[in-house]
Image (cartoon, rainbow, N blue to C red):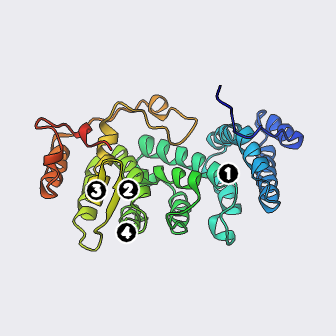
Amino acid sequence: MTTDRRPDTVELEELDQQLAAADNNNTDAIVQAVATYEARLAAADEAGDSDRYRGISRAYREQLITTLDTATQSGGWAFLNDILNAYHPETGDELPHVTTILQNVTSRYIMRTRIADGVEEIPVDALEFFSSILHRLDGEGYEFIVEGMHPYGWGIGHPDHPVAEDIHDHAATDIFVVNPMLEHAFYADQHLAIDLLERIVRDDSIQLTLSHPTGQISEARSLLDAPAGAVSNFDPTIPRYWDWQEELDYEFALEDDVEQRIRQIVAENGLDSDLPSDWEISDLTL
């Protein structure tokens, strides 16, 4: 018999009431709910009560994301941006506890905007929110926050914010978070994404060897998992609690010229020998 070692959920009457009021299109209530969630997690963290911290998060994370997302679709970018500014990564030495909630909802806003209106309509403040988090990450800790960075790739090609350059620069710091950001960049614009992939793997200043169950692999081999993930049969799970491919009526199809450039990277890096003779891009999945 397997024992469930996850912490019990923690019910907070005040937060329950605020979320219930927010369901009635009360934007003040959702602002209060975000504040309550942040305060209760901060108190649990300060007390060193990790079980209570995880219990609160487990009980309310999905509901808070869904409620804030609904309010954002109604209230628009100005409403969400006010909340981002209140809990911006630059407001303190530590990232706010509500950061993962805001990453999720902001990701949804970015993705919907790009597909409906084009990359240039994505608010710069939304992308700066993500870049300010990325610049705080050092490859350690912040598991859910690192996960929440993946959709930053949807901003690639923005005329007023250097998403590709940010991802490139971060490759030397933490290739593991770069890989999924690059995969999301392929969903957004596969031609810009392959440009970025080529620049990173051909950057002589980034020569990493990574541990993998199959042995030691290069950063080029690791990053090829990004386009492989895009063509695979696995549905993306980030942002959490949202089937974005269904809502946005999105389907990825790799274009022939992009596939040839991926194959060229494989050949340049001598990776053919570890692949079947008739290998497909999906065979590059790690």
Which label belongs to residue 156? 2
Which label belongs to residue 172? 4
Q: Judge depth for marks 1 and 4 and give the one in front.
A: 4
Sequence-wise, the earlier of marks 1 and 4 is 1
Sequence-wise, the earlier of marks 2 and 3 is 2
Residue nearer the viewer, 62 or 25 = 62
Q: Please, what is the three-letter code of the amino acid marked with disc 3?
A: Ile
Which label belongs to residue 217? 3
Q: Is residue 55 above or below residue 100?
A: above
Q: Disc 4 and disc 3: Cα gap in Å? A: 15 Å
Helix, strand or loop at label 3? It is strand
The location of residue 10, given as percent across then percent down, is 81, 40
Residue indicated by mark 1: 79
Task: Choose top left, top right, bottom left or bottom right for residue 96.
Answer: bottom right
- How many other residues sit within 10 Å of disc 4, few (<14), some (14-19) or many (≥20)? some
Q: Disc 4 and disc 2: Cα gap in Å? A: 19 Å
Determine if residue 114 is in view. Answer: yes
Q: Please, what is the three-letter code of the amino acid marked with disc 1?
A: Phe
Q: Please, what is the three-letter code of the amino acid marked with disc 2?
A: Ile
Quadrant (top left/top right/bottom left/bottom right) for the N terminus: top right
The location of residue 263, given as percent across then percent down, is 15, 47
Sequence-wise, the earlier of marks 4 and 2 is 2
Please tell me which residue is depicted at 12% across the width and 53% down the height of the picture. Answer: 267
